[in-house]
Image: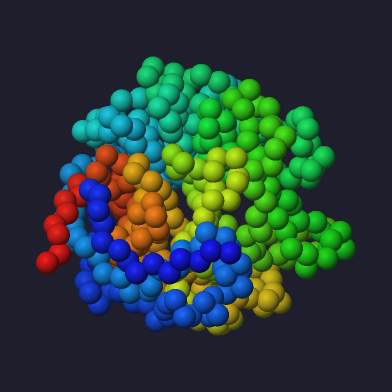
Amino acid sequence: MRILFSEALPMTRNIYLFSILSAASLFLLSSCAGSENSELPESVANLENLTVFPSDPEPQFSIELTRKQRFGDMGDMIIGRISGVQVDQSGRVFIADDSNKQIIVFDADGHLIELLGREGRGPGEFEYIHNLVLDDNYIYAKDFGLHRVNFFSTETLQYVNTIPLQVEGEPQDELAGYSPSVFWLSTHSDLLVRFSQPFGRAGSDSGDEERYDLFYKITQEGNVKPEQVLREKADFVLVDRTANSVSVFGTPFGAKFKLDTTQDGIVVNRSDQFLFRYYDHNGTYQRAVYYPFSRKHLSRETALQYYNNENYRRAARSSDLPENWPVVQRFMSDDDDRLWISTIIDDEDLYEWWLLDNSGELLARHLLPREQRIETVRNGHVYMRIENEAGAEEIVKFELDFVEIE
């Protein structure tokens, strides 16, 4: 095992940085230095090529965030529930609208260009539209109801084909009973698909066994490649079983597995630790970075406040709940392979965003209201989902300008 304790070395290359809102927002209570190896969680300390960073590095730049453009003006039409956002190199914005079952395309100046797809079960149509993904040639969107991915040309903005996500071929036995959930782009236009195992009714399984999600590549023809890419512990969920039914629902306080792809490979995180593991596109482990982080306490009374449904409350009362909130709320990579990570802090109205470079070094921290959701960072701009004056959601583009901190 090789563990490197970083001392937040000065940067030697040109890079955009996202700064701290104020020095007081740098809130971390635990730390880790060279002699503190014994304090690392066992699951962290056993990793090869692990870099452990200190908890209090200082940002090097401040940021001026200038509102430049909104994307939401559709005349008499209104954007419904936004379920995905992507931006291409020319600045066009693609918005998945699950209410209207279509992908809305705007140019960089906010003008409506095209509507892709519609409600239905035919080619290029959607029952549910989620999980929007973009590459140089295509825009992909998953239909959770029909277990398939429709993709459209980014050049012509026309429907191209549909990728079925049913399991066929060599790994069929291992994936028996599993259902495809989210997907990401991998190499050679393959999709990296997460397969999740359903829960049984009361008596059909114990409910106490550890559950794992499986990750495989699927080609554009819908063929599942036989090599398993990843096997990861499933998300924490609450389960309410009866003799005739089973209800499964996620929680805001349970640990979740998170993944994004970069140019070099795959980055994964389990949200109860500030630990990011890096793999190549075939799932071969490369390295990991870790920051100590003080987690917010979770009481059962607080957990119950999130549910009005009595079945959910019954499950929450009878389940073993985590003692603390997760560390990571969500994360994404930008077009420079930096990581943007929203962390859960004591203030229930804010997330503290961390920006890490490709080596894992902290570049900046910034507080944002929880209702201002960063969807993507592309072309030197941050794209946020924000509620407008009328109460409707829209996407707003902010230009980033950086000033070196003296």
Residue at left 26%, top 61%?
10
Q: Is residue 323 above or below residue 380?
A: below
Residue at left 25%, top 65%?
59
Residue 73 is situated, as x and y percent measured from the top left of the image, at 27, 37
Q: How many marks?
A: 0
Q: Is residue 38 above or below residue 312?
A: below
Q: Residue furthest right?
A: 203
Residue 151 is situated, as x and y percent measured from the top left of the image, at 51, 26
Q: Residue furthest front?
A: 2
Residue at left 30%, top 70%?
57
Q: Nearer the viewer, residue 148 or 191?
A: 191
Image side of residue 182 versus residue 359, left or right: right
Q: Is residue 114 above or below residue 325?
A: above
Q: Nearer the viewer, residue 335 or 106?
A: 335
Q: Is residue 30 above or below residue 69?
A: below
Quarter of the image with the N terminus in it: bottom right
Residue at left 71%, top 77%?
318
Residue 16 is situated, as x and y percent measured from the top left of the image, at 24, 50
Q: Nearer the viewer, residue 326 or 291?
A: 291
Question: Is residue 392 among the parts visible in the rendering?
Answer: no
